[in-house]
Structure formats: structure tokens, C-alpha cells
Amino acid sequence: MSAEDFRQPSAVISGPEDGQSLWQPLPSRGYVTVKFSPQNMPYDTFSSGIQLLPPGCHIREHGHQQNHELVFVYEGTGTVTIEGETTPLEPGSAVLFGRYARHRIDNTGDVDMKLFWVFMPPGLEDWFNAIGRPRQPGEPMPEPFPRPENVAEVQQRMRFVPPRS
């Protein structure tokens, strides 16, 4: 590639129903839609998507050994707990988790919490594929289902930092 190749404008657009969508197991439930990953765009330094977290559900405590994660709340309310310290979240809140920062997100409100996430370098989409089930936009939420039996092995392979408890 020449230096000129890097100066060519490029863009990728993902519409409201575009992206791979996956139902999530307990305790998150809801769904994730991967909007951008190295599989559908020319950039290999991040992946991003949306997550819907129903009332009373949560993203269990975890961290990442080799990734940073940015989360933006655009609907709903809840809390984020980072290394044991809890902070309220509301629409417009953004959180950047550095490597090894154990974190948990809880929907404490009475409506769905909707999050936009960016994962650097990419790989969160691999986690969602390993634990989720395919979802078609508009289909009703399935009955709650458990995480896969091999979830500890998947977490280890993806270099997750385990919860404290």
C-alpha cells in the first residue's frame, strides 16, 4: 500500500436492524447486536455494538486482561460498579473501563437500559457468539436460558478477569 491509500476517504454505515444480533443468557438476558467488527469493516482496532438490558438484569462482574471497553448509556437507568465502587448511570453517561478494571452494570430502572459499546482491540463479539443464541429483529424475547457449561473455559480463552466472588 502506498501512503496515498491511507488518505482515501472511507465509511461504513450500519442501519437500525443491521448487524449480528444475539440473545443473551442469564443474568443479562436481553440482546446484543454487533454493529461493527473486523468481519464487516476495514478497521481492525475495535468492535462496537448495542446491548439491551431488561429491568432487574445485569452484566455480571468481570474485567479484561487485554482490552479497554467504552460504554455509553442512551436509554434507561442503573448503576455501574467498578472495583467495588458503585455509581449511578443515566442517559448520556459514559464509562471507559481500562484493562483489569472489574466492572458490573445493573439495570435498576423499570425500563430497558440500552448501551452502546466499543471494545478495543476487538473481540467482545467472540464472547457474545460463544454464549448467545441467534436473534432476528422483532422476534419476542425467549424464555431465560443459562450460560453455556463451558463458560469458564471461554472466559479464560478470551482473557477475562474473573469476578472477585
Image: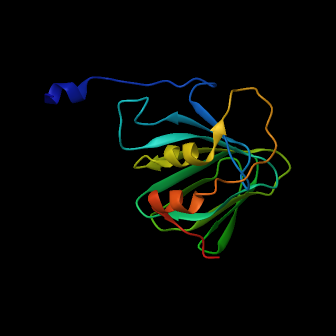
Q: Residue at x 53, y 49 (%)?
A: 127
Of all residues, the one furthest to the left in this rendering is: 2
The x, y position of residue 48, in whole percent, is: 51, 41
Q: Residue at x 40, y 24 (%)?
A: 11
Q: Check the image and report above or below for 153 versus 86.
A: above
For the N terminus, the image quarter is top left
Q: Is residue 57 found left or right of 40 in the rendered image?
A: right
Of all residues, the one furthest to the right in this rendering is: 110
Of all residues, the one furthest to the front in this rendering is: 149
Asked which colour scheme the image uses, the reply is rainbow
The x, y position of residue 146, in whole percent, is: 72, 53
Nearer to me, 86 or 53: 53
Nearer to me, 40 or 149: 149
Q: Check the image and report above or below for 21 versus 161.
A: above
The x, y position of residue 29, in whole percent, is: 74, 48
The x, y position of residue 147, in whole percent, is: 67, 54
Number of on-image labels:
0
Nearer to me, 85 or 150: 150
Q: Is residue 62 found left or right of 2 in the rendered image?
A: right
Q: Is residue 92 found left or right of 42 in the rendered image?
A: right
Q: Residue at x 35, y 30 (%)?
A: 42
Q: Check the image and report above or below for 146 versus 50.
A: below
Q: Is residue 41 found left or right of 144 in the rendered image?
A: left
Nearer to me, 143 or 2: 143
